Image: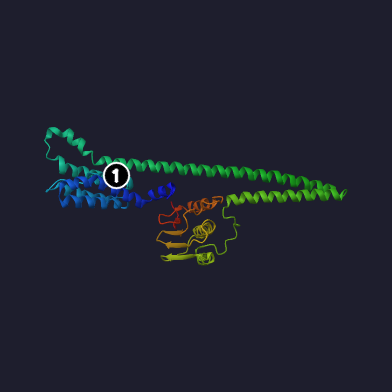
Amino acid sequence: MSLAALAGRVRRPWAGDLALSALVCALEFPGALAASGPKALLISAGAAALMPLSRRHPVPAALLVAALYVMGTRPPGYDAPVSAVLIALYQVGRRSPAVASAAVAAAGAAAFWWLHLRALPADQLRTVASSLAFPAMPVAAGYIVRLRGELTRRREQQAVELAVREERRRIARELHDVVAHHVSVVSLYMGVARRLIPVDGERAGRALLTGEETARQAMTEMRHLLDVLRTDGEEMDNQAGVGAAGLPALVAESGNAALEVTGEAVALPTTVDHAVYRIVQEALTNTRRHAAGARSRVRLAYRPELVEVEVADDGPGGTGTGTGTGLGLAGMAERVSSCGGEFEAGPSPSGGFLVRARIPLLEKT
């Protein structure tokens, strides 16, 4: 297995879950074995088994790990899963809203005081106060990491938006230059031809021919610029059959795909309807282009306030990243963004390539 493939596997969520479970086992099992009792081993095994849950459901996982911690502090024996508690609290701060994180940190401090500090004498209040911050520290660390990740994503999104605006301004300048230059040249030669027709028909013909060639060149250059702006490369008025109702025919035409529709179908807004169709069309095209022979699964889900479209194939996972221009995925993302939705595309954890869009049906205020 190559290093790149190994790195891809490590980045998958289940690999991280297994790593956390293995870490808890490595940290807790030596103490549990030293305790020489089944209770400590069961508590350590249970804490390690809860680690995968901490990523998807951090608050319930933290409560369950806390219950195991309390059991570990009760007689007989003492072997509380401290590492599992720290990881679970970190996951709460990393993956839960601020209110839930604060509530869990406060509850952890209260539980820590009840278990370990309430019996201390009053002259040790400074120790009590500093110790109460112990459960809140991993929650705060997770929340700080989460904020840094959100800031990084926001900066990346702003950089992409800035690049798009710059590219549009560049294309607008080029389009202006093309139109201004070639139209002025055509106008010049038409004027020359008009004056020469009565006196020199041959020269007038050459002037008309030059004007025709210039106009043809202008059309070619403008068509190229418009193809860059309109990534699907089709005429804007050619919208017959472009919508969710045309998906069965589109999927059948691909020859190696299946369509699954869930939920109660509703009439979609025109822009959303067209976006759904174009996303499926481009995703199937990318599959045929970059993963020939792969099977695709198209899923269209109608939900109360949004529509979700997903196209997944079982190819090698590089769809859309081959030798093309790369404008297909960018065009899909721009369509979804213009509808106020969310778009994601990339290798699927189960293999192949996945394109998913969630588009709201109601306008955001």
Residue 145 placed where, x, y %? 35, 41
Q: Is residue 162 visible?
A: yes
Looking at the image, residue 288 lies above or below residue 212? below
Q: Tell me the kind of residue under disc 1.
A: Tyr
Determine the secondary structure under disc 1: helix
| Residue under the image location 31 percent in, 40 percent down | 141
Judge by depth and name the residue closer to the eye, 320 or 141: 320
Viewer-side residue, 173 vs 248: 248
Residue farthest front in this picture: 1
Q: Residue furthest right?
A: 199
In which image quadrant can residue 168 be found?
Answer: top right
How far across and how far down the image is residue 135, in percent? 23, 42
Percent coordinates x, y for residue 167 in the rendering: 56, 44
Rendered location of residue 2, percent (x, y): 44, 48
Q: Pick whichever, 344 or 107, lies toward us.
A: 344
| Residue 341 shows up from this direction | no
Residue at 21% x, 42% y is: 109
Q: How many marks?
A: 1
- Per the image, the residue denoted by label 1 is 90
Is the residue marked by circle 1 packed among few (<14), some (14-19), or many (20+) residues within 10 Å?
many
What colour scheme has been applied to the protein in the rendered image? rainbow
